[in-house]
Image (cartoon, rainbow, N blue to C red):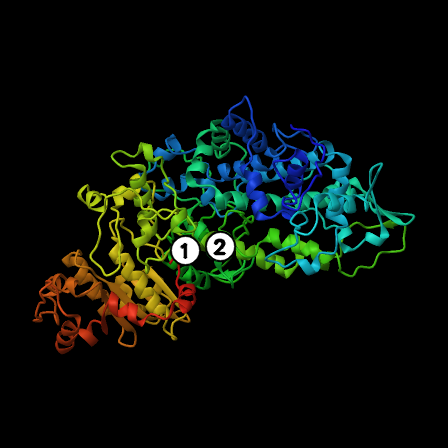
Amino acid sequence: MRDSTPSLTWSPFQPMLDLDASDAHVARAVVLPLDCSRKQLKHLLSLSGESETPFGKRLDEYCVEALKGTGSPEDPPVVESIHEIATFAARAAVRVEFADPLPGTHHHTQFPEHSSERRMMTHPLQKHPSLSRFTRDIRDHYVYNVLYAFQNLLPEGLQREIVAALFAPDSERRASTPKRPARTYYSQDESLRMLHSRYTSRVTQCEGGYEIPFTEVTARTFIEPVDDRLYLPSPDLDELPPLSRRGDSLYIPEEVVLVRLANYAWHGWYRLVSLAYQTLSDSDIQRYVETTPRAAETIRDHLDLRKPNRSFVPHFGAASQNPLVDPSSRDTISRPDKRLVTVADTIRASSTLNFDEPILLPELFDEICEFFPSPARPGNDVSNKQTLKNALESAIDDRFDTAEMTDSYEIPAPFPTPFAPRTKTSPWKQYRHELATLTRASIDIPDSRRISPFLPESLQPSTSSEYAASQQHVEQAAVSMPRHDAIRMMSVQPLVDPSEVEDLTAHEVLFLTRVGLAMERRIGTYSLAESMASFRDTPEGSELDIDVAQLEDRGVLSQPTAPQTYYSVPGSVRKQLGITNVSHDGWGERAPSEGTLHRVGIDLLAFLVASRPDVDRVVRYCDAWRLQPADCWDAVSHLEKKRLDVVGFAQGDPTVIGEVETKTGGTVGTQGTMEKLSSFPDRMDRYFVTPSGKHLPAILSRLSDMEHFDVEVSKRKEDGHRPAEVREALAESGAISTVFDELLTYYNIRRRLPDQSEMSECADRIVGAI
C-alpha cells in the first residue's frame, strides 16, 4: 500500500477529500462511505492500482476468500491497496449477484429448453428475491475488513478523527435531511486540516479505548446493538463492556467503537454496492463474471442440495416435478421458483401487504394482478388462484406457514437488497440522517460510574418508522423500476464492442444502439412521444458519419413515414447489438418484431388516457388475465391469454381500453383487435388508434369481411383515407358505438395531450418506463 500517513494539505480550489493525494484520504472514504458525496464514492470505485497480478485473478481470489463465510475482524484483507477494501467489495457483490454458473451443466440441460426450471437456473442469485448467502458473505467480509483496517492500518490521528465522526461530531441536524443526509467530508466551507484538528482534539486514545469530554457527549455517543443479520465473532456482544466516567470525560471501550463501526459499515456496504450496481454497465458485470472462474465453481458447488445448503435463507423454492423430465433423474440444485418469486416481489412492491403476517389468498392474488415486475425481475407466471395456491403449498422452506384462517399464508421476509435503481430515500441515507439527529437528541446520562452503551430503543436508527419506510421504498424500486442503460440519449454507449459487429462502423453501431434502446424505452429521459431527429447528432454538435438510406438498403434500419422523425431497428439487429427485448406485460410486447411506429402509438395513447381526470393508473401491454378482480371479467374472460395495448383504471377497475393498429399488421391480428375492443362493456371508453389516414386502406381491407366494416370510403392522392370520412362511414355502419367508441390518429392524440409541464404528472400514472 502507499504511505498511509494522513495528508492534510488543502487549498480552496480542492475538494475536502482528494482521493488521488494519499491513502489517508482514501481510507476515510473506505471506512466512512456514508460521510462522502456520491461524486467522491464514484471516484473511489473508479480507482485502480498497479499490480503484477491481473485484476481478474485478484478479484477472483477476493471472492473465493469472502465466500468461505469464515472471516473475522482479525483477518487481514486480501487486497494490495486500501481502496480495494471498498472497490473489491462492491465489484464482488455485483459479480456474485449476477453469477451464472449453471448453464451448460447437467443440472441445466436435463430440463426442456424453454422450461421455467432452465430460466430460473440462469442468474439464480439475482432472480431470488432475497440476498443469497454468497452476497451476504461479501457484505460481512467488507465489514470485517473495515474493522481490521481501522484497528491495524490507520495511524492514531486518523483513528481519533474517525471516532469523533462516529461518536462526537459537530451538530449536524440542521444540515441533514433524509434525502440529503449530513456528510462529514462534503464541506465546502473548511479544509480537511481544520476538520481533522477540531475532531482529534475531542478524542483521546487510551489503553483499551477512547475518552471524550462530557461537553461533547450527546445521544450520538451511544450505540444500538449490532444488526442481528451480521455475525461478529469478536467482540463478544453478550458481554459488551459499559462506558464509564473518568473525571470530566466519558471512556468508550474499543469494543463499543467496533460495534458502532460495524453497524455503520453494514450500511456503508449497501451504499457502495448500490452505487456500483447503478453505474456499472452490463458488459462490465459480465467481464467480472468471466474473469473469476473460481468464484463460479464455489457458488455452483454450494448450490448443490446434496451438501449442507444455506444458499438461500429464506428459500423461495418449491418442490415440483416437470412432467417432461425423466422422473428418475436427480434434481439437486437449489434455485428459486418463479411463482414464489412473483409472490415475494408482489409483497415487496405492495404498500398494504407485509411479510411474516397472515395474508388471505384472494387478497394476495388481487395484489398480484396489479403488480407489474420490472424487466430486471422474472416475469409473472401466476395467472390464477389455483397456480398461486399450488406454489405456496409446495414451498420447500418451512418458514412459509399456513395461518389459522382458511386459505391464509405467512410469507417469510427476504433480506434487504442494494440492487435497485437510484431512489430519493434509502436505508443507508436514513441511517446516516438518524445519526445526525442524535447530535441534538435529548438523553439522560446516569450518575453511576458504569453506563450502558446502548441507546434507548426509541432512539435507535433502525427502529424508526422512517427507516422501515425507506427500506420499503428501495424494495419497491428494486422490483418495479427500470434499470436504464443510459440517463439521456447523448450518454448512450454501445453495449457491445463495435469492432466485433460485422459490416457496421462504430458510428453506425452507436446510432443503431441509440434507436434500439429508445425502442425498448431504456433511455431515462427520452420518451417515444418525442422525435428521434437528434439521434444523428454528437455531444459536440456535429453529426455521426452515417447514411440512413444505405442502412435501410442493408436491412438494419427502417424509417416509418410520419410527421416526426422516427427510426426502427429490427429485433435481430437489436439482439446483435446486445439489446434484449423487453417482453414483460406492462412494459413491452411479447414479440421483438414490434416496430417503432406501433410503440409510439401505444405511448401516445397511454399519455392521452393518463390525462383523463377519471383515470388514476394506465397499463400498456396488459395481459387480460389481470382483469379477473374487475366487474367486467365475465364479459372478457375469453381474452385471458391476450395482451391489451392500453388499459386505463380508476380505483382498480378498468374504465378505458385502447388498441393500436398500423398498415403492416395481418388480417388475423387486426380482426382480433376488433374482437378485443368489442368484448368490453359499453360503459367503458374504447379507443381505436392508427398512425394516420395512410394506414386506413390496409386496415379496412383486412376488416372488410367483418360485420360493420364493409364500407365505401374515397381515397386521397396519397393512397390514404381521410380519417373524418372513415369515422363518418363507420358511425353509419354501427362499428363506432358497437365495436369501439372513437377512431383516433396520432395527430388527433397529440392535439389533445396536455402542456409539457403536465406531461410528467401523466407519466407518473403510467406503469413501466415511459
Which quarter of the rendered picture does the C terminus lie within? bottom left
Residue at point 39% right, 75% down? 613
- Where residue 369 appears, x then y in whole percent? 39, 61
Circle 1 residue:
525
- Where residue 739 appears, x then y in whole percent? 20, 71
Relative to residue 585, is residue 178 drawn left or right? right
Q: In which quarter of the image is residue 669?
A: bottom left
Helix, strand or loop at label 1? It is loop
Q: Nearer the viewer, residue 261 or 314?
A: 261
- Within 10 Å of disc 2 (Cα), the crowding (few <14, some 14-19, many 20+) is some
Q: Earlier in the sequence, mark 2 or mark 1?
A: 2
The relative height of residue 356 versus residue 332 in the rendered view (above or below) is below
Relative to residue 285, is residue 657 drawn left or right? left
- Where residue 498 appears, x then y in whole percent? 33, 35
Helix, strand or loop at label 2? It is helix
The relative height of residue 392 versus residue 266 in the rendered view (above or below) is below
The relative height of residue 127 versus residue 304 in the rendered view (above or below) is below
Circle 2 residue:
477
Residue at point 9% right, 71% down? 711
Tell me the amino acid under the disc marked 1. Thr
